[in-house]
Every structure is written in C-alpha cells, then in structure tokens.
Amino acid sequence: MASDEAALTLAPARPAPWRDPKLRAIAYQIVFVAAVVGAVGFLVHNMLGNISRQNIATGFGFLRKEAAFGIGESLIPYSPADTYGRAFLVGLSNTLYVAALGIVLATILGTVMGLARLSGNWLVAKLAQIYVETFRNIPLLLQLFFWWGLLNTAAPAPRQAWQVLPDVFVSNRGIAYPVPVASPAYKWMALAVVVALALLVPLRRWAAARQAATGRQFPRGWAGLGIVLGLPLIVFVAFGAPFALSVPSLHGFNFSGGSAVSPEFAALLLGLVIYSGTFIAEIVRAGILAVSWGQSEAAMALGLKSGQRMRLVVLPQALRVIVPPLTSQYLSLTKNSSLAVAIGFPDLVSIANTTMNQTGQAIEGIAMIMAVYLFISLSISLAMNLYNRAVALVER
Amino acid sequence: MADIAQDIPVVRQAPPPRSTRALGWLRVHLFSSVFNSILTLLAVGLLAAAVPPLVRWALIDAIWSAPNGQACHAGGACWAFIGEKMRFILFGRYPADQEWRPIAVVAIFIAMIAAACVRPLWGRRLAVVWFAGLSAAFLLMAGGLPGLRPVETGLWSGLPLTLILAVIAMLFGFPLGVLLALGRRSRLPAVRGICVGYIELVRGVPLITVLFMASLMLPLFLPAGVTIDKVLRAQVAFILFAAAYLAEVVRGGLQAIPKGQIEAADALGLSYLQRTRLIVLPQALAMVIPPLVNTFIGMFKDTSLVLIVSLFDLLGATEFALTDSNWQGFAVEADVFIAAIYWSFCFFMSRYSQLLEREFNRGKQR
Amino acid sequence: MSDAKATPGPTQGAMIELQAVHKWYGDFHVLRDINLQVQKGEKVVVCGPSGSGKSTMIRCVNRLEEHQQGRIVVAGIELNADMKNIEAIRREVGMVFQQFNLFPHLTVLQNLTLAPIWVRKLPKKEAEETARYYLERVRIPDQADKYPGQLSGGQQQRVAIARSLCMKPEIMLFDEPTSALAPEMIKEVLDVMIGLAEDGMTMVCVTHEMGFARTVADMMVFMDRGEVIERAPPKDFFANPKNERTRTFLSQILTH
Ligand SMILES: Nc1ncnc2c1ncn2[C@@H]1O[C@H](COP(=O)(O)OP(=O)(O)O)[C@@H](O)[C@H]1O
Ligand SMILES: [Mg+2]
C-alpha cells in the first residue's frame, strides 16, 4: 500500500522512524548532547555544593578590591594600592609585550637559521643544525631556568658586571644597555617614517603604471628602502643630528642611566626566542624545500636572475607553505610565555596565580586567563583564515 | 646496434683534473664566494671565542669530587654536585632503601619504548608486552604486594614520574583523541560542534591553565568527600591536554583518506562502524605515525610543567636538589645535566620519527 | 508492509527500475525525469558527454547519492531512506569505480574477503574459497597475497571486479571502469566484463568503449544534461541514431 502511494506521488516513501537515518541522526545527537550536558551538569552541581560548603567567595567583585601586592615590572603605572583588576591589566600588558617582542625576534632568528641550514657553506649549515637540534630537544621550562640561573646566580654583581658589548652590562641585576636621550627630533623622525610608508603606495602605483606603459622596471625595493630610511635621516640632520646616548654606569650597587631589563624578563625573552627560533628555522627550511627544484629550473630557463627567481617564483610559493605553521608557532610562543610564572616574571598567569592564592577564587582566575588566551588564539586564527582565503584567491 | 657501436672507435677522455681533494672541498663548501668566505671566517671566530672557555669550564677547570659546596667553587663546573645529588635528581623523594624499584621502572619504560620502535614487533604482541610492562611498573612503583612496601604517590618523583606522566598521557589520550577526531568530522552538527569546541578550547590555552584547572578546580568538581591524588590530578590534565592535540594529528590522517575509499566501503555494504574500524582508521593512523611520535616528544618535554603545581618530576627534583644549603649556586651544572637526559631522549625519538617519515614517503612513491 | 519489500523476492519484472527520478545539487538540476528499466540478465551501456549525469545516475542505484524525487526499485526493494533497504540493496549490487578504490592497507585476498566476512557474515574459510575462485575468474590467481600498490592498473581493476563479485551480487554497476587505464590494459578488463556478461549477470556500464558496447549491450542509453535522450538496441543506436545530440556525440567519439 505504501508503495502504491509512493507510485502516485513519486516521492520516496518514508521508512519506519527507527530505520530512518535522519531521525536516527537526531536521536544520536540528542543522546550525545544529553550525556555531555549531564556530565557537565554533574560537575557544576558538585562545584556549587563545594563552593557553598567551603564558603568560597564567587563573582568578579574581587577585581575592584585592593591587590596589596607589588609587581616587579610594569608597562603601566601600578602600585600595591591599586585593584586586582589593574594588576590583571599589568599582567596582560606584560604578556602581550614579551610575546610581541618574542615573535619579532624569534622570526628573525628562525629565518636566519633556517636559511643558514640551507646554505652551501658547510660550517654555517652545521652550526645552524647544531643550534636547532640542541635547543629544540630541551624543555623550554628547563631552558628558562638555565638562562635565569645563569643571569641570577652565575652572573656577577653589578661591580664586576660582564661587558658583553660596548656599554652593555650583564650582571645579576639584569642587562643594562644604552639608550638615546629623548629629543624632540625623534618624534618628528617617527612621523617621517609614517609619511615615508604612506609614500610607498603612490610610488608603487607609479612604478606599475610606468612598467605597463614602457616595460621598464623600476627598482621598487631599493627606492622604497631609500625613502623609508632617507626621510627620517633628513629630519635627523635637519634637527642638527642630536645624538646623545644615556650610558649605564655604576653607582653604588647598581647601574644608573641607560635602560635595563630584569633577569626574569631577559631570561624569559631569551628562552622564548631561542626555543621558538628552532621551530621557525625548521618551518622556513621546509617551506623553501617544498618549492620543487623544477620551479627554480623553469625560472632559470625563462632567464630570470637569481634575485628575481627568489622574489617572483620561490618566495611566493614558499610563503604559502610557511605561513600556516608559522602562525601556530606564534600562538605557541604566546602560550609558552605563561611559563613566566616559574621564574617570577609578572605575566598574566603569574599575576592571576597570585590573585587566586590571595582571594581563593580559582574558578574566576582560571576563567579570566582562559578567556584572554582564547581571545588571542581565535584572533590569530581568524587573521590566518583571512590570509589563507586571500592566498587561495590568488591561486585561481 | 651493439655491433655498430663496436665499430666506432671510442675516444675516451678523462675529466679535467680537479684540485686536490681536501682543498677542493674547502673551496666548494667554505670559500665559494666572498660572502661565503666572510661567513666562514665569522663562524670560525665564533667557535674560537666560545669553545675554549666552554671546554675550560666543563672539563679543564671542573671539579669532579668535593666534600661540600664551599670546596667546589673554583671557576669551573662543579660536577661533584651532580655526583652528590644524582640519586635525588633521578629518583627524588622515593624512599632511598627502595631505590631498585624506580631503577627497574625506568628500565622497563626504556625497554618498552625501544620495543615500540621496532617495526616488526608492531601488533598484538607489542600490546601484550606493553600491558605487562605497565602493570609491572605500576606494581613496582606503588608496592603493596608482599615484599614490596607501599609507597604513596606523593613520593613518586624524578625520571620515573616524568616517564609515567608522558607515556600514560599518550596511551590514554590517544583513544580519546581518535574519538574527538572522528567527532570533529562527523556529519552530526551537535557532535561536531562539541568536539570542535573541546579541541579548540584546550589547544587555545596554555598547558599551565589546564594544570591549574586540574590541581585547583578538579577537587571542586568532585562530589563531597571524594578526594583525588595530586599525581592523578596532573595525569588527568595531561591526558585531556594530549587528547586535544592528538585529535588534530589524527584528523590530518582522516582528511588524507581519499573519498573513493569510503564510497567503496559503502558500496560493499559496510556500516559506519565497520567502515571506520576496517578501512578508515587503519589507513589514517598509519599515515600519522611520524607526527604522533612528535606529539609524544612534545608531551615528554611538557611534563616538566608539573613542577609548577609542585610535583617532583625530573626537573622538579632537580630544582629541589638546588635548595640544599650545603650546595649553593650549582644551578647551571644541574640544568646541563638534566638537559642532557631530556635531550638524548628527544633527539633519539625525533631521529626515529624522521626515519619513519622517510620510509613512509618511499613507500608512497612505489 | 515495508518489511515484505526488504527481502529480495522473486523478481517480477525489472531488476532495476527508475521512475521519474530527479536530483539536484543545490540549484543545479543534475538528473531530470530519468526513467529506466533493466531486466534480469540485461546489459545496459550508458554513454554521454562528460558531466551529463551518468555517474550520478548509477550512484543513485546503490544510494551513494540520494535522489530527491521519483522512485527507484532495485531487485524488488524500494530505495528510500530506510536503512534496512539501503543495506539490502548494497548487498545485492556490486560497483566498480573508475579509480578502482581498492583498500591499500589490505592484501588482495583481504580486499576480497572483507565484505563477505563482515557484511554477509560468512566463515573466513568459505570467504577465502570464494575469493580464490573469483581471482581465478579474473585471471590473477597468483596475486592473492600482494598489496594493491604492487599490481598494475589493469590487475587492480580486475581485483576490484572480483571484490564486488565475492558478494555474489545480482547486479553489477560499472562507472567508467577502463578510463583510468593505460591502453594496453583496457582489453584485459573488458575481457573479464565480457565473460561476466556471458554468464548472465545483470549489468549497467557507463563506458565509452563502443566496441564493448556493440558486443555486449542489449540496450544503449544516451544521456545529456541530466536527461536520457535516447534509448535503443545497439544495432539501431549506432546505425541510425534518432536524436541530433546523439549523432554529434557518436561522431565525436567514433572518429577518435
Ligand atoms: N557533489 C557534487 N556537488 C555538486 N555538483 C556535482 C557533484 N557531483 C557532480 N556534480 C555535477 O553534476 C554533474 C554530473 O556529474 P557526473 O554524474 O559525475 O557526470 P558524468 O559522470 O556524466 O561525467 C556535473 O556537472 C558535475 O559537475
Ligand atoms: Mg562520471
């Protein structure tokens, strides 16, 4: 009978509900969600019970209370009289600062080492390989302890500080280095850099238009570099080249003048850069090797010169391979910066840890750390996806 | 053809003489251009500046035995400290008179890992060996049998703890990771959503937060009166953490299975479970063995973080050994020593993973 | 009522019956009003330009694709969302793919015994006997313990055919089984298919091997843009195609 109906309407007949894959799918999902919700509910129920039994405070009210602990270094003004909320901000800014600096430096180190491993120079390639294989295979936390121990215990007191570079002193108080004395010229130079960067756009357009019209190539790279460096230089000279360095010098038991970073910050940055640098070196190397030799040969056969070959053929393809793993490396560097808590650098996690110990509000503390890192991770993933989409479009 | 070739007189010409071999090698590999020569000189300069002081510190000026810390400060490395503290660094607070037990456990673990690296052994027999090995290791560590004094987990420390945390995390995280990966590729949106959410949540936050969560929040999650061991708490954190990373590794393998494989299985009438178990997983997992080894290396290094939740793994025991007031200021020596332990293990495993990868690639080209 | 249909009863009439079948990919109407009957033992060859919906049509027969309108009855079983029916039909219908789709992690013998053991629940011994019998029939009895990667394309495709036959299907579907093969291997696969046809298997083949079609087909079906344009016995089909599009198509593939 059912088949007669089906023949009339010519619509596929519905099966018995328990043999209908669509209904089954819905049933499976309901069971799965119910199981997950049940398990989470059980945990939350226990948690609420435990919280009320142990009289643990809840809510984020503590953020407005006085923190009453000092923070060794901070990018924004802070004193123990400030709130937990402000302390949290200090930690966040420290995390972002060390992560951003670490990403820049690790990229430079990793790229140099990755290229060095591909170098035809045997000695250079070997040294780069030793660097990569040594530091990649030792836990980062151990490396942090090592650098911190080296700076804190093995390094001498400021009086006998090691002078590693002219006017750069390493002691158990950290690393002291010279900085230029502030001058109004610098502000204008910064502005000049911005102007120069803005000028690059019309320059590029003009060069492309000229090439289209006459076929002549314009050395865009060099001209651009010239503008970006030259314009600030002109401003600098126009201000009478005000170049005064504030040099660290020993006063009593410590250095004054110049600028200094704490052993904790130095150890954290050094560890992050050296450890992540090994992974970035491998990513760069693999990316360049992934561009087949055939591509280079084809470019050679077309008569492109070595620089053009790299810029027009190899790099664009290598970047497509390099960028995704590089991004995840940046993410792990940022997450790894949380190891600061072990050597006492006041990053987000370390301040949240102190807060949790003082207030006993572990749940809120951990929730805040997780929210911040998730936000960072998701933003970077989003940027990554946008980049991938852009690259995919170029591909077609 | 062959006889024609014989008729033509062949003029054999030797290749042009190459410069003496060593000199030629140097020219090609170190001084091929001005830029390369400068690089070579810089590298030699760097080596000349770094190697002699290092050798002097580590070997020439080093002190190999000393009664106490004060007698050990002489400009060179104090290896006497390592000799003094070796037992504590390796086995931590485990009762000293029971030392043979952690030694045996480490030996068992190393033997099991070595066995797992021998491909002909892969299969059911290896699983049996591992099951037996793990049971034996656990019994040895915990004791409780006649003749074996019970030792509470709070005293488990040093290298055995490091090995246990890493290996168990992989072993238990793996099935969980496979399920998560399958869930992430499921056609059921609710299952997919929850799996994606879990994976991204765990991978998006630092391991430390997962450890904090396990050590601070896990007790709150349990019903009143139920307590959970500190080591177990950390172990749970590592399992949950490893599962998320393993899920992504496995997903890579699942994605590489051609659609035709699934269609063929469907056309033969296999069900979802049969298809997954017989066709999809065997291929997907075989493909991801090298990255699985890499994940294991990562986990092994990551176990060092338990020190932050005050467990005494290899690194934790070392840091504790450094607090001895009779032996102050030997952090560098101690760090170098355990770095060598971590390094040997990770280096061996990563070489092994590279070897596997090369073999697999060769297999693919056939 | 539906239970009665789930068991492949004595075949009254067609082995495969498609009635007014429609299918869309999103807004794209890939199958339009397909009507087709295949009798027991009949051999149907489907041809048509690339993208005309040939694969989609035969994949609807064993539910690798889902049709959205119309009726499909295979071996007496109505094909609808009922999982029981889908399982039953897949047991009765063998399929051979253009890309072989052998399981590379299993030996040839394991490829052949997998479905009989897990789907038909045959004892392993019996499944292996059947497998060896069919390996003999596709003329590679000595390759049983090799892996697919160690075989040539032609051998792989013959293993794929044997794999389907091991399920003792009533119907075999072929989706361009020789298109991925080097010319010298096409014949060995076609010979196996001809042998199968001679034994009376019900077959639907998507192929452009017109020589094969002439010798084997009882019925030619020409598809274009999702429609069945023409249907005729091979003699008429090749001698005087009625439709303009058929003529163009035939002139294109026969001049090559
Ligand atoms: N999964 C899919 N999603 C969207 N369009 C599809 C899909 N599969 C096939 N098509 C389209 O359906 C049409 C018919 O495909 P197919 O049946 O494979 O043609 P044939 O086998 O005759 O070459 C083609 O235009 C193809 O692009
Ligand atoms: Mg097709």
Image: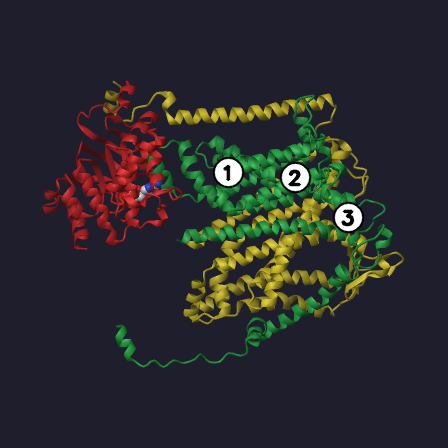
Chain colours: A yellow, B green, C red
For label 2, the residue is B105
Q: Residues within 10 Å of mark 1 (few under 14, many from 20)?
A: few
Q: Position of residue A291 (x, y in %)?
A: 47, 59
Please, is residue A27 above or below residue B39 in the view?
A: above
Q: Chain of mark 2?
A: B
Badges 1 and 3, same chain: no
Chain designation of label 1: B
Disc 1 from disc 3: Cα separation: 57 Å
Q: Residues within 10 Å of mark 2 (few under 14, many from 20)?
A: many
Secondary structure at numbered mark 2: helix
Q: Which mark is residue A73?
A: 3
- Distance, label 1 to label 2, CA atoms, is 20 Å
Q: Are marks 2 and 3 in contact (CB under 8 Å)?
A: no
In the rendered view, tell whether residue A101 sits above or below residue C205. Answer: below
Q: Please tell me whether mark 3 sits on a helix, a strand or a loop.
A: loop
Q: Is residue A93 visible?
A: no
The amino acid type found where label 1 is placed reads Arg
Q: Amino acid at mark 2?
A: Val
Spot occupied by residue B90 in the image (x, y as percentages of width and height)? 72, 44
Q: Which circle, 2 or 3, is nearer the viewer?
A: 2
Q: Which mark sits nearer the N-terminus, 1 or 2?
A: 2
Question: Which residue is at the far right?
Answer: A252
The answer to whether one can see residue A260 in this image is: yes
Q: Is residue B131 left or right of residue B343?
A: left
Return the residue at label 1.
Answer: B125
* Residue B245 placement: quadrant: top right
Mark 2 lies within 8 Å of ligand 1 (Cβ measured): no
- Dot 3 crowding, Cα within 10 Å, few <14, some 14–19, many 20+: some
**View quadrant of ligand 1:** top left
Q: What amino acid is labelled 3 in the image?
A: Glu
